[in-house]
Image: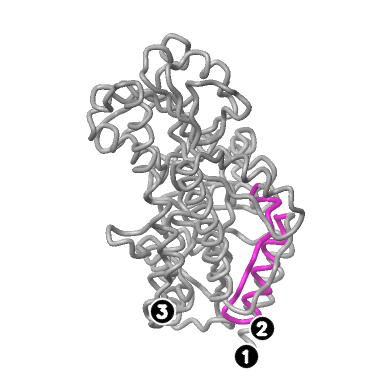
Amino acid sequence: MEGFYLDYENILAKISGRTARLGVIGLGYVGLPLAVEMAKAGFRVTGFDVQQKKVDMVNMGHNYIGDVVDNDLSSLAEEKRLFATSDFSLISECDCVSICVPTPLDIYQQPDISYVKASAQQVAEYAHPGMLVILESTTYPGTTEEVIEPLLTEKGLKIGEDVFLAFSPERVDPGNKQYKTKNTPKVVGGVTERCTELSALLYESFLEGGVFKVSSPKVAEMEKILENTFRNINIALANEMAILCSRMNIPVWEVIDAAKTKPYGFMAFYPGPGLGGHCIPLDPFYLTWKARAFNYHTRLIEIAGEINNGMPEYIVERVSRILNRGKKPLNGSKVMLLGVAYKPDIDDIRESPVLKIISLLEKEGAQVIINDPFIPKFTYEGREYLSVELNAENLRDCDIAVITTNHSCYDAHIIAENAPEIFDTRNLTAGIQSENVERL
């Protein structure tokens, strides 16, 4: 037991004195902002990534994540407070390691935790007594204890005595101007009480949002799934209301505006062309998959997924109907999509429903042109798409403009004045009364 107290007191002192060497595995939308905040607080941070391009960009101080301030990264790289590498043997020099790697779904809509497993294996290979390991990647309840813990114990390390293990879900919302990594509250659950205490101490040393401690990693893992499932289901309700309101000739946006005047018992969610990003479209299916092991069928979650996943088809159907009213077939029509990013004012197209809309339109023979001021070009299904200029000439030249992302730089009046037909899936044209504008 004496060794346990030495290991615990040692890492406790290092975190408190900000002399602990911190490691972050995965330098993407979660990992890089986390590493930057750690380094800004005075810690020396090593970032690990298998993509050499990201490693090189970090070490040159070149930012590629919208939520990171360019000058912060460049100064930290220059001062060597933040160093990136693809050499995972340097994990052995770290006192605390955060795992922030992707957790996608496979083609069968089942969790793919291969990135988590690979990272955990690297950590286990170079782990040492007195190390704190925290998983941040969103995953199904049980992953921390069922996947990562055995890898560490197989190395002869005892959790809560030799090494300390916890789960703390990432809460990154790209493009959010109010809440960033630094000021967003953190939830943390350790395998043991000591694991929780050390993890909370680490986060409190460089974040300002506060830390909420829970009783176990499973609680923290389930909490994260609940957050995103809540949003998924409520967006599905808004989408279903939009479909029904369209059939009943009732403006759904006005309905929602009226409902949200109630000061209690209602939270406004909005319809759209479908779900995007790495969290809301994917995370609920982690719970759906895990629930099967307990002989439970998550009917509500799966129905919500069906509704949201079906929105791109519904959007294309509405576009076709609008064109038909003008005696134009979808086949051969020029359709301008305004926005490819899955949410406004970012350059992120991960899981964007607009990609599926592009595919469906082209399958029907439509000529698709794209404008997105944040994405000059992108590749989808082996084809490169270039963003055209959003001007009066290009708007007049198309048969219909579909507003798929409500970027704040879009001028709804210019769009309405020049496009022959407009289908607005984001209510960007709110307040504009024009015969050529139809809203979701």
- Is 377 magenta? The answer is no
Q: Is residue 107 above or below residue 29?
A: below
Q: Position of residue 74 (x, y in %)?
A: 59, 35
User: Is disc 1 in contact with disc 2, using a CB cutoff of under 8 Å?
Assistant: yes
The reply, left or right, for residue 364 in relation to residue 318 is: left
Disc 1: which residue? 1
Q: Nearer the viewer, residue 138 or 251?
A: 251
Other-residue count near label 1 (Cα within 10 Å), few / some / many at <14 / 14–19 / ≥20: few
Residue 5, numbered label: 2
Q: Position of residue 289 (x, y in %)?
A: 38, 70
Q: Is residue 15 above or below residue 436?
A: below
Q: CA distance from mark 2 to mark 3?
A: 43 Å
Q: Secondary structure at mark 1?
A: loop
User: Is disc 2 in contact with disc 3, using a CB cutoff of under 8 Å?
Assistant: no
Nearest to viewer (mark 1 / mark 3):
3
Nearest to viewer (mark 2 / mark 3):
3
State which quadrant residue 208 falls in: bottom right
Q: Position of residue 2 (x, y in %)?
A: 64, 88
Q: Nearer the viewer, residue 216 or 420?
A: 420
Which callout, 1 or 3, points at the residue further toward the start of the chain? 1
Q: Amino acid at mark 1?
A: Met
User: Is disc 1 in contact with disc 3, using a CB cutoff of under 8 Å?
Assistant: no
Disc 3: which residue? 296
Q: Amino acid at mark 3?
A: Tyr
Other-residue count near label 3 (Cα within 10 Å), few / some / many at <14 / 14–19 / ≥20: few
Q: Secondary structure at mark 2?
A: helix
Q: CA distance from mark 1 to mark 3?
A: 42 Å
Identify which residue is drawn at 37% across, 17% down. Answer: 398
Q: Quadrant of the N terminus?
A: bottom right
Q: Nearer the viewer, residue 176 or 434?
A: 434
Q: Which stretch appears magenta?
A: 180-207
